[in-house]
Image: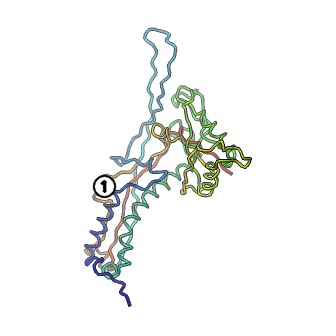
Amino acid sequence: MASLFTKDTLPTTSEEAIRRFDDRYNAIIAAAAPSSWAERFVADVDAPRTTFPLSSFTSGFRETKEESGRFRGMSEKTFDVSVVEFDDGYEAKVFDLITNVFAFQRWMEVPNAFILAEARHHATQLATLLEAGTSTACKFDDVNFFSASHLSNPSDAGSSTWSNYQSGAAAPSLANIQTEMTAMRAVKDVNGKKLGVEPDEIWLPTEKFQATSDLLNQAFLASGESNYMAGKLRAVHVPELTDVNDWYLVDSKLLGAYTPMIAARYTALDSRLGLRFLDENSDFFKKTGKINASKHIWAGYGMLFPHAIRRIVGA
């Protein structure tokens, strides 16, 4: 009978098991982060509480009425994001780690699981913010983040309004997508002029993604005519969305200047407190014969500018 143990591949002590775990974790951290729709909104911050400016500054020329010209104020709002601690962890019997190759292989899979879990955590938190956007006040102009009455100039209550929300049920058909793209182009800057939004992504829950993606990528319609929406939008799967119907249009080119949301990740404690172990010196080991590894992260989340994203109630 073949042995289940491979002596050369197993650690000889719990200390070696922890060291090899730590080495693998650091190697994965150094590699490229997994691609995700949410990754672009994750930003490292250097303080547990960070203040983000919420200025929407767009210049516009007006006729000169006097030699000195006219000057407008550069009013600015701010938005604070505070981080909180999150953690996850795994434990293992030392006896299994030094005698059973399968147990040790599972132990060495944990570092990758931590990295993927953190990325998924950020995505889940951001998706939760999106879905609460119809009832959560937006710091930009103090109306709901998804609203049909955003102020062009949040410093002027009498300024014109614009919408990033369609509350009437509309499935992501070609005709509806075309209509909503047109509506999104009406988003205004602080001068009340069209900002120049040009949606190029459509974010979809799992239940709507495949059918909509296929619809947008087909070359011909059922009538035999060319698909007038082909190549206009990139379909993006957002598996963290819990609503099976609602969908979102996004102008990815505007996300830098008009970031809709932020996952503020505080990393100053990572080297000391981010990855923790309970080894053979711990009371935990003395009581259970186990060691464990836990990953701790500090992150905060918030909604910023509503300009580059539009929510459509689906059907």
Percent x, y of residue 29: 34, 58
Q: Where is mark 1, residue-wise?
A: 269
Q: Residue furthest bottom?
A: 1
Q: Residue at x 71, y 44 (%)?
A: 225
Which structural element holds mark 1? loop
Q: Is residue 197 left or right of residue 20?
A: right
Front-most of residues 268 and 206: 206
Q: Is residue 50 left or right of residue 154?
A: left
Q: Residue at x 50, y 22 (%)?
A: 60
Q: Quadrant of the N terminus?
A: bottom left
Percent x, y of residue 276: 31, 65
Q: How many marks?
A: 1
> Is residue 146 depicted above or below 270 in this figure?
above
> Is residue 117 depicted above or below 192 in this figure?
below
Q: Is residue 288 left or right of residue 303?
A: left
Q: Residues within 10 Å of mark 1 (few under 14, many from 20)?
A: few
Percent x, y of residue 223: 74, 47
Indicate the amino acid at tag 1: Leu
Front-most of residues 255 and 234: 234
Q: Quadrant of residue 207?
A: bottom right
User: What sort of colour scheme is used for the picture?
Assistant: rainbow
Q: Quadrant of residue 84?
A: bottom left
Percent x, y of residue 291: 32, 74
Q: Residue furthest right?
A: 223
> Is residue 95 depicted above or below 76 in this figure?
below
